[in-house]
Image (spheres, rainbow, N blue to C red):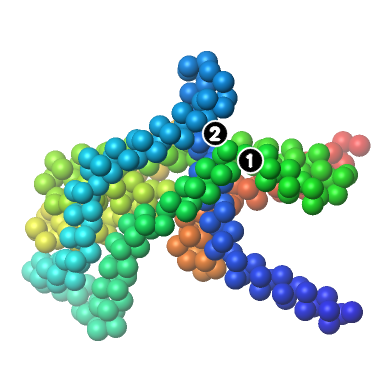
Amino acid sequence: MVCSITALFVAIIWFFKVTFSVLLLILTGALVALYFHGFARIIQRKLRISEKLALVISVISTLVIISLLLWFMGAKIQQQVTELAKTFPLTVNNAKLQLAKTSFGQKIIEKTSSDEISNKIYSYGRSFFNSTFGIFTNIYIVVFLGIFFTISPGIYIDGFLRLIPLKAKAQTKCTLDKIGFTLTKWLKGQIFSMVIIAVLKWIALTILGIPMAIALALIAGILNFIPNFGPLISMFPAILIALTISINKAVVVTIVYLLLQIIEGNVITPSIQQKLINMPAALIIIAQLFMGIVSGGWGLVLATPLVAILMVIIQEVYVKRIEAEKYK
């Protein structure tokens, strides 16, 4: 019996390890569905129409807006992203030439001049650009998964609740509702913050005369979805591109990115999240580190919503029960 229980425990751990990426994909589809429902509620309040009609308008209008953006800007963005990916090794070499003009830059080159480090930088840079935008080739899977969740969420929720014992069914339903409410508020704040950062950095890079400003701003906006690490990662491509012009230009770009990040991290995001949802920053960083090790990029991207889900579950299942026992 002990061997059987141990084998079952190991099999469950192995199953979740193997299928964890699939679970993250399902979570992404659920976030898409929450976006559609949240957008539908806004439409319903503004136009005073039925919920179903607002949901249809939400899905169709979102797909139309994305299609129009890709139609008008897709060709230019794709050209700039392709150019970034192809010229990345040359960009690094040009950056080294610029750095070699100063003593501080020469010290940096000496510490990063080994072939192993150079190969890692090249491979990471190329995979960064390709994977960041190559994901768009598979994004339709998540979109359609989100649409299926949007059309009939009750089927999936009721099916899950059937697996829960009768005594815990009401508590589980309440917890699921609060998880959906919390994730919806978090998603609103993230989308708003991403759009603001993308627009601000596009304006700043355009004023500074940095090539491929649209692609760099789009990278910054998308990676802003990843708290803490995303903005730092998005800064390096812009610095490398600026180094091909001059060291002074790279310094200015670095300062601009840091200033915008300070404004976003201390003004924009706190003001948005304070009204919507409050999550400890240190807890998010810890979750990102663990999730990055377990499942790579997807784990890093979805660490924050997973923290939000765990916070709601712990609050509903454990904390409230402890507090209730105190007042008995």
Q: Are marks 2 and 1 in contact (CB under 8 Å)?
A: yes
In this orientation, which residue lies closer to the viewer: 277 or 170? 170
Q: Position of residue 161 (x, y in %)?
A: 77, 46
- Label 1: state its secondary structure: helix
Residue 204 quadrant: top left
Above or below for 211 versus 277: below
Task: Look at the image and tell me whether residue 132 can be seen.
Answer: no
Q: Which residue is mark 1?
A: 153
Mark identifier at residue 37: 2
Mark identifier at residue 30: none
Q: How many marks?
A: 2
- Label 2: state its secondary structure: helix
In this orientation, which residue lies closer to the viewer: 59 or 91? 59
Q: Position of residue 259 (x, y in %)?
A: 28, 44
Question: What distance separates the C-alpha of mark 2 from that of mark 1?
Answer: 10 Å
Amino acid type, callout 2: His
Above or below for 300 versus 324: below
Determine whether, in the image, residue 228 is placed left or right of residue 307.
left
Density class for disc 1 (Cα within 10 Å; few <14, some 14-19, many ≥20) is: some
Q: Position of residue 326 (x, y in %)?
A: 86, 40
